[in-house]
Structure formats: structure tokens, C-alpha cells
Amino acid sequence: MRFLWSLPLLLAAVGCSTARQPSTTTAPPRSLVETTSRAPAPRRSRPSAEPQIAVGSSYACGLRADGRVLCWGVGASGQLGDGLALPVPRAPVEVPLIEVRQLAAGAHHACALLAHGEVFCWGSNAQGQLALQPDERPHHPVRLPLPPARALADNPLCALSEDDEVFCWGEAAPEALRDAHGVAHLASLPPSRAVSVSDGEACAISTDAEMLCWTSSGVSKVPIPVSLIQLSSRAGSGCALGKQGQAFCWGDLPRRQGDVPAPPTLIRGLTGATRLRVGDGLGCALRKEGTVACWGDLLRGGPWSWDLERVSPSGIEATEVPGVAGAVDVAIGDGFSCALRGDGQVLCWGSNQHGIVNASADPVVLAPRIVPGVDLR
């Protein structure tokens, strides 16, 4: 991912106010990270977490109802969060965090938002994804120096504070706005309800349900003719979800016409969407009845991916994933996709080169299959 920030334009549109100085602590506090040195103190009961799934290019993570996280697949940069960095597929392992409320995954790093607003990340730090110096590459979760947050971008290089302000780090942070920790406070953006990050671009939905995006050319309002509630973007593709369950996508979704990225385009055949996820040239949506539909390059983890006889030639028409019912979340990786069912089971399909679907030698799994050893109830 490469962000090319234009200093004069960005400062004019976003502002260069001094970022607030959050805590510099990077060591996980004992109350939030699992420790075996002593028995935990009695806790006041908290509401259970909403089970979720998030996937990167070669790994997957799931949030259980008890607020704990499981990760599996290939974690050569420590993406599985258990302190190891191994370039081979691995069975599910538990990340040493508790009270997690939101989970998000980038291509090579993952982040968790905890109950009190703390953000912890793990995995690759090659471009400052962990808000550390590039030569610092821990393989365990580290706390980011952010103010209390209420939401993460699904490609976690930005977060929304409890005051609906946007904070970004790593490649998503404009250099002129970075504080001593590499975190940028985009102070002049309007209060925001959602934020997303993609190659060369970041976008936010304002509290007025409008979308603003900022790139190397500055900040602009994106004309989408509906009120928006959610964003998702990855690898030059982006989608926005309207209040009535419709999806508008741009960039490589739908497919480019020559070298020109597509403007926001309504996805045909998609109704009742409640959640969107975007991968490299592929989009998928969770529908309110618990089914999943995908569009774009269906060979990259879409319905019956890799099966040429079944792939629709249209990049803007949603195709339902057969065999998925009762889903509550969906995620897209590198050539594979996954759905979380309400019973806690995870279904995945597409490429199995990273061992996401199972530990067998099957290089491709054409139909959704339950991932063994993962129960997110």
C-alpha cells in the first residue's frame, strides 16, 4: 500500500493542528492482556462481544463472544498474534488479549479494539502498521498511542475516537500531521461515523452521512446520492453501503475501463445488504436474511471461485454464494473468502494455499466448507 500525500493541498483541506498527545505506553496493561504470573482480579461482568471475522492476505482471525480472538493460517510476520512468526500454515491459536470488542485485519497486520477504547495491533510493522519505528517488529500485540477509540477501519490504519475524530498511522498518516509516535490527527475533518483505507486513498462518512475522501490531490466530497452508513476498501477498490442496503463501488470495483478507475457505481442485484467487505478486485455483502453475495473478480474468492464455467462476466452484478445461510459476518482475503454463521461456525472457500479452509493438501475449495477447530460462540 502506498500513500502519496500532497502537503500543500492536504494542509489546506485537512489542517495542521497539533495532534493530541496520547499515552506513550506500548506495553499491554495487565488488566487487558492475558498473564499467567498471578490469578486475575475479580471482574465486573460485561456484555458479551459480537462475534466477528477478519482476514488478511494469508491469515484469518475471529472474535468470540467472550471477547477473545483466534487466528489461523500463515503468519510469517506474526499475524497470528501468539508471539511466533512462521511461514507455514498453522491451526487456530489464541491471541493474548481479553475484552476485545472489534477486530480488523490488514494484509499483513491485525488490530483489536478493547472494551475501554484501547487499540492493540500485531503482525507486520514494515510501514509503521503498529505505530512503531520500522525496525521494531514485535510478534505480539502492542498498544497503539491513540486516544480512546470507538471504531477501527476494516483495513486498520485509522480509527475513530470517542469524539468522532479521525486518527491514522503508518502509511495512512500524512507526514506533516504526524506526532512523535507517527500518529496523525485529521483535526479539520468533520465528525465522522466510519473510516476506510485503501491504496493511495482514505475516506470517511461524516455524521451527515456524506463521504469525504483524501488522496495526494487533496480532500473532496464524493457524490453518492444516498445516505451512507458503512465503508470498506482495500487495494485500490472501495464500496459504500447505503441506509437502504444498496452498495456503490469505485476504483477496481467495477473493473477498470482501461487505466481509468471507475466512479461510484451501483451494484446490480444487491438488496438488503447490512455489511460490506472489499478485497483485491472483489466485493461481498452480508444480507439481512443471512446470505452472502459477491461481485467483481469472482476468481479471487467469489462464489465458486476458480471455477471458470460458473463465473459471471459482469463486474457490477451481485452473485449469491451457494451454501451460505445464517451468516452474521463476511470477510475477503487473498483469493479466498469467509463467512461467520450465527452458530459460531466459520465457512471459507477459494484458495487454500495458506491453510485457511483446512490443513489438507486441497489447493482450492470451490464450495464453502466449515473451518475445523474454530468456534466463535
Image (spheres, rainbow, N blue to C red):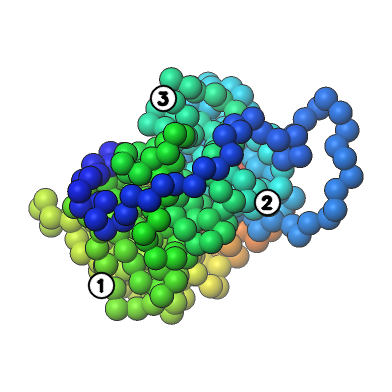
Residue name at image x 85 percent, y 53 percent: 44
Q: For numbered disc 3, what is the local secondary structure? A: loop
Residue 206 place in picture, x, y as percent? 40, 68
- Disc 3 or disc 1, which is closer to the eye? 3
For residue 358, say whether it is visible.
no
Q: For numbered disc 1, what is the local secondary structure? A: loop
The front one of 63 and 327 is: 63
Q: Which residue is mark 2?
A: 116
Q: Residue 260's quadrant in the figure?
A: bottom left
- Whole-angstrom CA distance, mark 3 to mark 1, is 37 Å
Mark closer to the chain start, 3 or 2: 2
Mark closer to the chain start, 2 or 1: 2
- Whole-angstrom CA distance, mark 2 to mark 1, is 35 Å
Q: Which residue is mark 3?
A: 134
With respect to residue 178, does 314 lie above or below? below
With respect to residue 168, does 296 lie above or below? below
Q: Which mark is residue 223?
A: 1
With respect to residue 30, does 321 lie above or below? below
What is the three-letter code of the residue carrying label 2? His
With respect to residue 56, does 14 lie above or below? below
Q: Could you tell me which quadrant the N terminus lies in?
A: top left
Residue name at image x 64 percent, y 40 percent: 70
Residue name at image x 54 percent, y 38 percent: 144
Mark 2 closeness class: few <14, some 14–19, many ≥20 residues within 10 Å: few
Left or right: 377, with 83 as reference point: right
Residue name at image x 88 percent, y 33 percent: 39
